[in-house]
Image (cartoon, grey):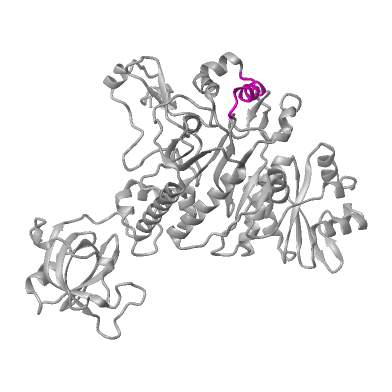
């Protein structure tokens, strides 16, 4: 193999690989990058040279430089090289219209191998699916993939667009502490032991929520930051233990003011990052309406298949399953799937299993035919009841009515999943369509059956709806919060509220949540005390930046838009984190571990993890 070359000034790059075009023909250029692919055509050797900007074809011709041609025989995938040569037009008929540099190539007259590479454990040059665990283990290789480079670029553009927009709107970017104290954000905290205060712990912030309210009390008026947030919670495709949000807060504003700024912010991000004009203004839908029509508080409104509650229609029917659910306070609800009357038994069984996987007890159905509604349970309904069912679903011949009868929450969840599943099967979701909306008027609190108390639906600092203050002590479950979610294409991308800015109202909320005065003072005394010094009315929102980028990139998994993500078990396969701590460090922190015993340990054949 050829001797490695030191990176000398004489081969310092003049251009990036992806920027060369026909206008550069005749120019002498120096390029640095990775060998993407090598092809030996006998007399000529071709490589695709890659850097972040793209690919360019480099040609090694012994008649131009015999030494460069000789060294090129040693090149392999992912070698790092420097080349110098002249940009030439490709011979007629060999152009590559799918490549931005496809009209030209570079005829090399100087080649230096800057570093060699082992054979990579995977390649992105073919369509072979690579196991995600392998990709995450070798993330530094995975990020060389042009798709991943594109995702990082879109993320960068989105972040810069947000910063520019908010700065121009008069927001101040302010960093808030990473080492703080626990705050009630709905998930477990990551705790950090204090060496200088033995037995005490910091909590990593689940969000900067209390801090941004304090910034409003401090007179900052408009604040933002791209904040790192850390939550020890169960993960899924659109969650990570550490994530980024565009944290925003404003003083002296109404809900409409927050909406107007947020809509323009999102429009700017979409425009700058992917060149799309996001429609504004956004429609608004109450929480109750969203659940009634779509079964979820984050509905995808790009397609129909809206849910219909037929509980009153079937409550008196002879079909006991429906009648009993209606009598017990449950709901009989479903959707009409167009053109699906001819679904076979096997397909229906799979759909039944699908809703059962999402907690429903089963799936009832009617086929709409020339003769009316038909199906296994049609005989339990009168002609009038069947006609009323068909009218309720606005069903036409050839359609299928699909119904779930269950507790309200279970039926809504199962039907939300079924609605999206049928939309995908029927190809009802339009591509390249963006459908944002606001979901408003969430409940202020939700009943915790296990602990027999009220919990905050979002967090304890949401201002109640002005029309519902009198219900706080009498009927907390009926109180609406001045909270809101931004939803785009079925994804919750932001959540916010108008905040409580008076101590008396905040203390009333704590009482509803069964937080005593003593506990409130212990946990939030510094915050409550700040209310005594002229807290302005304020409100804000926190768009989830990673989810936004996931949508902008057209990805289905949030890990595809984070440079170094964690697995669903919150582990970093590349770095091996989390990992055991050095016993000396534990001693410095006055900590001693009591680890769970594995089955092997009980048998005396293993070690405690």
Give the residue furthest to the bottom: 92
In the picture, which quadrant includes the N terminus? bottom left
Q: How many marks?
A: 0
Which corner quadrant of the image does residue 565 belong to? Answer: top left
The residue lying toward the viewer, choosing from 35 and 150, is 150
User: Where residue 177 appears, x then y in whole percent?
Assistant: 40, 30
Q: Position of residue 256 (x, y in %)?
A: 61, 46
Regarding residue 463, the answer to whether it shows in the image is yes
**Location of residue 186 with respect to 503 vertically, above or below:** below
The secondary structure that dominates the magenta segment is helix
Residue 318 placement (x, y as % from top left)? 90, 47
At horizontal 14% and vertical 64% (from top left) the residue drawn is: 74
Please tell me which residue is depicted at 58% across the width and 47% down the height of the picture. 259
290 w.r.t. 51: above or below:
above
Q: Quadrant of the C terminus?
A: top left
Kindly tell me whether residue 226 is visible in this rendering. Answer: no
In this rendering, position of residue 320 left or right of residue 471: right
Name the image quarter holding residue 315: top right
Position of residue 3 measured from the top left corner of the image (x, y, whole percent): 7, 59
Q: Which residues are magenta?
A: 501-515
**Residue at horizontal 9 percent and vertical 58 percent from the top:** 9
> Considering depth in this image, is 59 or 447 the residue closer to the camera?
447
In the image, 567: left or right of 327? left
In the image: residue 210, left or right of residue 14: right
When the figure is inspected, residue 105 is found, relative to residue 343, above or below; the finding is below
Give yes or no for residue 507 being in the magenta stretch.
yes
Q: Does 245 lie within the magenta span?
A: no
- Which of the pair 585/204 is nearer the observer? 204
């Amino acid at each position: 193999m050829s001797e490695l070359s030191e990176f000398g000034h004489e081969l310092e790059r003049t251009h990036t690989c992806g920027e060369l075009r026909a206008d550069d023909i005749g120019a002498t250029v120096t390029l640095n990058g990775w060998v993407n692919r090598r092809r030996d055509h006998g007399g000529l050797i071709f490589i695709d040279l890659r850097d972040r900007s793209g690919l360019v074809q480099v040609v090694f011709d012994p008649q131009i430089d015999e030494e460069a041609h000789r060294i090129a025989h040693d090149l392999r995938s992912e070698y790092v090289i420097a080349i110098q040569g002249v940009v030439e037009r490709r011979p007629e008929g060999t152009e590559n219209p799918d490549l931005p540099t496809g009209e030209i190539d570079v005829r090399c007259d100087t080649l230096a191998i800057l570093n060699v590479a082992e054979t990579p454990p995977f390649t992105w040059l073919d369509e072979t699916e690579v196991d995600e665990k392998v990709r995450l283990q070798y993330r530094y290789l995975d990020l060389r993939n042009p798709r991943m480079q594109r995702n990082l670029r879109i993320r960068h553009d989105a972040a810069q667009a947000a910063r520019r927009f908010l700065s121009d709107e008069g927001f101040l970017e302010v960093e808030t502490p990473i080492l703080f104290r626990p705050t009630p954000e709905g998930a477990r905290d990551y705790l950090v032991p204090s060496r200088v205060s033995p037995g005490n712990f910091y909590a990593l912030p689940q969000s900067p929520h209390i801090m941004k309210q304090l910034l409003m009390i401090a007179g900052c008026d408009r604040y933002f930051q791209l904040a790192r947030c850390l939550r020890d919670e169960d993960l899924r495709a659109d969650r990570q233990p550490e994530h980024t949000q565009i944290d925003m807060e404003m003083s002296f504003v109404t809900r409409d003011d927050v909406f107007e700024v947020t809509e323009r912010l999102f429009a700017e991000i979409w425009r700058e990052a992917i060149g799309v004009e996001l429609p504004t203004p956004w429609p608004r839908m109450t929480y109750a309406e969203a659940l009634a029509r779509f079964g979820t508080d984050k509905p995808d409104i790009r397609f129909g298949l809206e849910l219909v509650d037929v509980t009153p229609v079937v409550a008196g029917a002879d079909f006991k399953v429906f009648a009993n659910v209606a009598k017990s306070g449950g709901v009989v609800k479903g959707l009409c799937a167009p053109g699906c009357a001819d679904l076979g038994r096997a397909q229906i069984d799979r759909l039944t299993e699908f809703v059962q996987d999402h907690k429903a007890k089963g799936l009832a159905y009617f086929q709409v035919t020339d003769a009316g509604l038909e199906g296994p349970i049609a005989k339990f309904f009168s002609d009038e009841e069947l006609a009323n069912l068909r009218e309720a679903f606005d069903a036409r011949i050839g359609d299928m009515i699909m119904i779930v009868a269950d507790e309200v929450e279970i039926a809504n969840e199962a039907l939300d999943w079924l609605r999206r599943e049928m939309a995908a099967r029927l190809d009802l979701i339009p591509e390249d369509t963006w459908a944002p909306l606001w979901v408003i008027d969430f409940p202020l609190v939700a009943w915790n059956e296990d602990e027999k108390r009220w919990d905050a639906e979002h967090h304890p600092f949401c201002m109640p709806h002005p029309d519902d203050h009198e219900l706080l002590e009498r009927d907390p479950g009926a109180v609406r919060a001045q909270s809101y979610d931004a939803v785009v294409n079925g994804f919750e991308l932001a959540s916010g509220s108008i905040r409580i800015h008076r101590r008396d109202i905040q203390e009333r909320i704590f009482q509803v949540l069964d937080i005593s005065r003593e506990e409130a003072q212990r946990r939030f005394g510094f915050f409550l005390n700040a209310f005594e010094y002229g807290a302005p009315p304020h409100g804000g929102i926190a768009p989830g930046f990673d989810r936004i980028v996931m949508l902008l990139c057209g990805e289905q998994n949030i890990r595809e838009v984070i440079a170094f993500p964690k697995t669903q078990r919150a582990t970093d396969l590349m770095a091996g984190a989390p990992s055991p701590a050095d016993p000396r460090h534990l001693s410095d922190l006055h900590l001693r571990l009591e680890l769970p015993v594995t089955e092997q340990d009980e048998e005396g054949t293993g070690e405690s993890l």
